[in-house]
Amino acid sequence: MNIGEAAKRSGVAAKTIRYYESVGLIPSAGRTAAGYRVYDRRDVETLRFVHRARSLGFPVKDVASLLALWNDRHRASADVRALAEGHIHAIDAKVAELQSIRRTLATLVERCHGDDRPDCPILEGLADPSTGGDCCGGGTA
Amino acid sequence: MNIGEAAKRSGVAAKTIRYYESVGLIPSAGRTAAGYRVYDRRDVETLRFVHRARSLGFPVKDVASLLALWNDRHRASADVRALAEGHIHAIDAKVAELQSIRRTLATLVERCHGDDRPDCPILEGLADPSTGGDCCGGGTA
DNA sequence: TTGCACCTTCCCACCACGGGAAGGTCAAGC
DNA sequence: GCTTGACCTTCCCGTGGTGGGAAGGTGCAA
């Protein structure tokens, strides 16, 4: 099948498939005499795997590792698990950072009456955080 | 003062200050006869404001709006508050997405024994999500 | 005058694509 | 056989927000 069909079946945009090939995430596809890329069902399976890993937020480099493990019959599941756990930790760190920011913002917003007067604790907090509640003070970020 | 000193005092890297100037976030700095950028205390205040807004995750475009409001004596605090609330909503969406992903990953990791055997529910879940718990099924992403 | 720290502009790299241009290919319909 | 339109190809630019580094000019002190 052509790249468009592979894209439809895998959920990965044709542009993105070409990108994945260019960065070596997936092997180079075969070509017709006219230069069109050719894919089979196995390729689509691989693309689907990549698509799901990406939608779980794994960086492309990690997806490459996951693909390699997937294709390795002698893999140790501990390696896969370590990758996934690392990703979970990264997510936890990101969530903690976002929630810290959210708390600061919510505090500022609460104090702002939000009418047509210029007086605004949000701007004051940005101009001088000591007046606006601590921000990122003990932050993990 | 030179850009290096302004960077030190504001917490914004010299490179980043030049970038902010190039995209119009901050006005063009004055120059010495030799072409060096010159900053005063007010400029440093502005840079600090920008630095704090950025560290709260506001995109540069929003920081531009915040700066404009900050410099506008006739602003309505409602406009500032709306910006901040919009940012909070964006953060909430991001957090929800990350937590959804986290749940899926945690489920997969739990099921993986993580030893030297190749059997691995994480890879199986990526290859075929119907066997690995739902992922992003009703997802907001 | 030498040396070093600082400044300037410029381009490249990151990450993971998306848009779009310029041009070739294929299959269907007339 | 020719047109039409959908598909494919490569290539380059843009995103956001910097960081790194090259090549070259400045400023100040010894």
Image (cartoon, coloured by chain):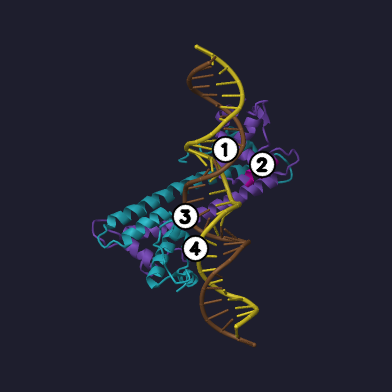
Chain colours: A cyan, B purple, C brown, D yellow
Which residue bears the numbered disc 3?
Answer: B98
Distance, label 3 to label 4, CA atoms, is 10 Å
Residue at image x 66%, y 49%? B82
**Residue type of the residue flagged with mark 1:** Thr
Gap between marks 1 and 4 measured at Cα: 36 Å
Pointer 1 residue = B16
Q: Helix, strand, or loop for circle 1?
A: helix
* Residue that numbered label 4 is attached to: B139
What residue span does the magenta drawing correspond to?
B61-68
Mark in the foreground, 1 or 4: 1
- Find numbered disc 4 in the image and state the secondary structure of the residue it sits on: loop
Quadrant including the N terminus of chain B: top right
Q: Chain of mark 3?
A: B
Please, what is the three-letter code of the amino acid marked with disc 3?
A: Leu
Side of A72 relative to A62 (left or right): left
Quarter of the image for residue A39 reads bottom left
